Amino acid sequence: MSQFLPARRTVFGLVFGWAGLGFWHGGPAVASEAAGPVEQLHTGLIVIMKAGQMMSFRQRSEMIAPVVSRTFDLDTILRQVIGSRWALLPAAQQSALAEAFRRYTVASYVANFDAYSGERFEVAPAVRMVGADRIVATRIVTAAGKMHALDYVMRQEGAGWKVVDVLAEGSISRVAAQRSEMRSVLTDTGGTGLLVSLQRKTAELSGGILQ
């Protein structure tokens, strides 16, 4: 399971602490442009969750892939995860790793958000500033009313904003967790080994449909 992904099965199995942020809403109107991509992600996730087993893994992957690409700055995330070694990798290997990481991220969302049981996503109207970045606070609310918190670290890319990290409980960085895992693989097996690892995990998540 992806260390970067705020996995539905994992999130719904934990009760995250939540600091009160005043009025919440689950509708389309948000207080900041930085929250727009997160709202789009939520909408896309609800769609594939409701599709569930009525559509194949590949079909749901094709539905959510454009949303993931628009929402996340996967290139920046991957460079943050790999660190200074990124510049030492051949250009062809960088491209292959970027594509494998994208497919892995998409497969992780499809695998983990695979059924709908009345959940809803809510976004806090107040967007926090951390330097040039913005923090969009959200929560997932189950049909039973249990709430689980996730914060999205947003960074401006040209005319828009994209996610560069996801924080569980307001501080547990998915990028930091994934950095430890992927750098270990890179140290042991090099860029080729990391590529194979990402492809293998994608295949496992998709039941061999994707890699």
Image: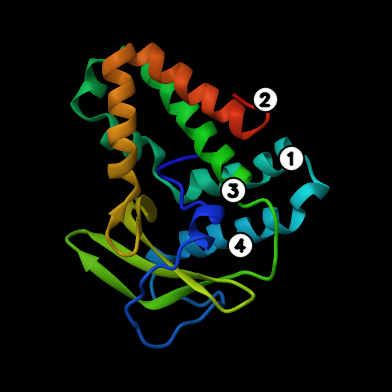
With 150 as the anchor, is 49 left or right in this view? right
Amino acid of disc 3: Asn
Q: CA distance from mark 2 to mark 4?
A: 27 Å
Q: CA distance from mark 3 to mark 4?
A: 15 Å
Q: CA distance from mark 4 to mark 1?
A: 17 Å
Q: Do the residues under discs 4 and 1 have CB atoms within 8 angstroms?
A: no
Q: Secondary structure at mark 4?
A: helix
Q: Is residue 123 above or below residue 113?
A: below
Q: Which residue is mark 3?
A: 112
Q: Residue at 54% x, 57% y: name it.
A: 41
| Nearer-N-terminus badge (1/2) | 1
Q: Position of residue 106 (x, y in %)?
A: 56, 40
Q: Which mark is residue 59?
A: 1
Q: Which mark is residue 10?
A: none
Q: Which residue is mark 2?
A: 208
- The local crowd at label 2, few if under 14, some if 14 to 19, many if 20 or more residues have their Cα within 10 Å, is few
Amino acid of disc 2: Gly
| Nearer-N-terminus badge (3/1) | 1
